[in-house]
Amino acid sequence: MSKSKSKTPKTRTRPYDVAEHLRTTEEMALYLDACIEESDGDAAFIAKALGDIARAQGMSKVARDAGVSRESLYKALSGERSPDFATILRVTRALGVKLHAAAA
């Protein structure tokens, strides 16, 4: 009798995408707050978080609501650069989230 090896199916993984888990505006606001808290002043990190939220809502819709092209929005929120503050304000408005200040 020959011994047969049982083939165990390989587990397939894929990179974690936070945008797939941001379903409500409350979750999006909490995520943005956490990213701002962890950013240590890194504007590109915060822009990337806004990009995650924009992808969760749909980049085309957010770009249209913010009054920018989809390509410009991808570039601004890539995390590779720091977008200007006017862009941040337009995007947060389009996303339905607000930035607010608290005493440090």
Image (tube, rainbow, N blue to C red):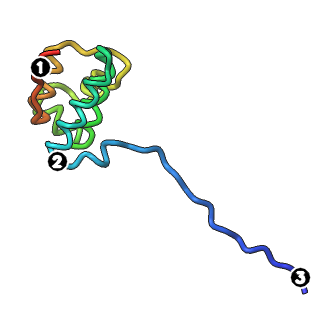
Query: Residue 68: image x %, image y %?
Result: 17, 25
As drawn, 97 above or below 89: below
Q: Amino acid at mark 1?
A: Ala
Q: Amino acid at mark 2?
A: Thr
Total numbered circles: 3
* Disc sitting over residue 2 in the figure: 3
On screen, residue 36 versus residue 12, left or right, reads left
Query: Residue 22: image x %, image y %?
Result: 25, 45
- For label 3, the SS is loop
State the residue lying farthest toward the right: 1
Sequence-earlier tag: 2 or 3: 3
Mark 2 packing: few (<14 Cα in 10 Å), some, or many (20+)?
few
State the residue lying farthest toward the front: 104
State the residue lying farthest toward the bottom: 1
As drawn, 26 above or below 75: below
Query: Residue 99: image x %, image y %?
Result: 12, 24
Sequence-earlier tag: 2 or 1: 2
- For label 1, the SS is loop
On screen, residue 34 versus residue 87, left or right, reads right
- Which quadrant, please, contains the C terminus? top left
Mark 1 packing: few (<14 Cα in 10 Å), some, or many (20+)?
few
**Which residue is disc 1 drawn over?**
102
Sequence-earlier tag: 3 or 1: 3
Q: Amino acid at mark 3?
A: Ser
Q: CA distance from mark 2 to mark 3?
A: 57 Å
* Disc sitting over residue 24 in the figure: 2
Pointer 3 and pointer 1: residues touching (CB < 8 Å)? Answer: no
